[in-house]
Image (cartoon, grey):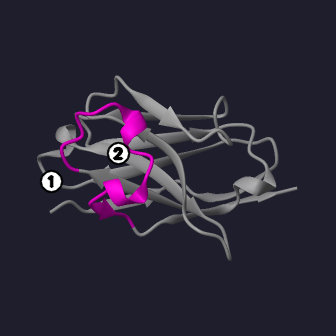
Amino acid sequence: QVQLVESGGGLVQAGGSLRLSCAASGRAFSSYAMGWFRQAPGKERQFVAAINWSGGSTNYADSVKGRFTISRDNAKNTVYLLMNSLNPEDTAVYYCAAAAHGYRSASYYWSSNSYDYWGQGTQVTVSS
C-alpha cells in the first residue's frame, strides 16, 4: 500500500511559478512510476506529466511542455512538479499518482488507468 500526500498548491498570479511536492509512504517508492494529473471544475481529469522509476524518462502533456518539469528524489520518497509561466488555464486540483512496476518508458504512463494509488489533490489557482 502506498499513501501519497501532495503539497505546494496555492494562489499565484499569471506568469508566476509554483512547485508541487508529493510525498509517498512505503519502501517500494523507487520501483513506482509517478504521475501528475489535474482536474478543473466541470472537466475531466487530464494527464500533466509522468516520470519512470529512475527518473531517466519523463513525459508531458502538450499543454505544459516547456513550462512544467517533473522530477523525483527516491531517497526522499518524493516527486515534484515545477510549474513555470503559469496561466489561468492551469487552474485545477492537481493529483499525484503512483504506478507499480514503473520500469517502462514514461510515455506509457499517460493514462489514469495505469496508476494504482492517488493522492487527495492540491488546489492551484492562477489569477489573471
Residue 69 point in image, percent of width and height: 54, 33
Residue 92 occupies quadrant: bottom right
Q: Which quadrant holds the C terminus?
A: bottom right
Residue 5 occupies quadrant: bottom left
Q: Amino acid at mark 1?
A: Gly
Work out whether residue 39 or residue 75 is closer to the camera in this orientation and state it. 39
**Residue 105 among magenta residues:** yes
Q: Is residue 86 left or right of residue 56?
A: right
Residue 16 point in image, percent of width and height: 75, 42
Q: Residue at x 33, y 54 (%)?
A: 114
Disc 2 crowd, CA 10 A, few/some/many (<14, 14-19, 20+): many
Q: Amino acid at mark 2?
A: Met
In the rendered image, which residue does mark 2 sit on? Answer: 34
Q: CA distance from mark 2 to mark 1?
A: 14 Å
Q: Main secondary structure of the magenta part?
A: loop
Q: Is residue 79 above or below residue 37?
A: above
Work out whether residue 85 or residue 18 is closer to the camera in this orientation and state it. 85
- The residue most toward the bottom is 42
**Residue 80 among magenta residues:** no
Q: Secondary structure at mark 2?
A: strand
Residue 103 point in image, percent of width and height: 22, 34
Q: Residue at x 35, y 45 (%)?
A: 34
Residue 85 point in image, percent of width and height: 75, 38
Q: Is residue 26 left or right of residue 67?
A: left
Q: Secondary structure at mark 1?
A: loop
In the rendered image, which residue does mark 1 sit on? Answer: 26
Start and end of the magenta stretch? 100-119
Closer to viewer: mark 2 or mark 1: 2
Q: Is residue 52 left or right of residue 35?
A: left
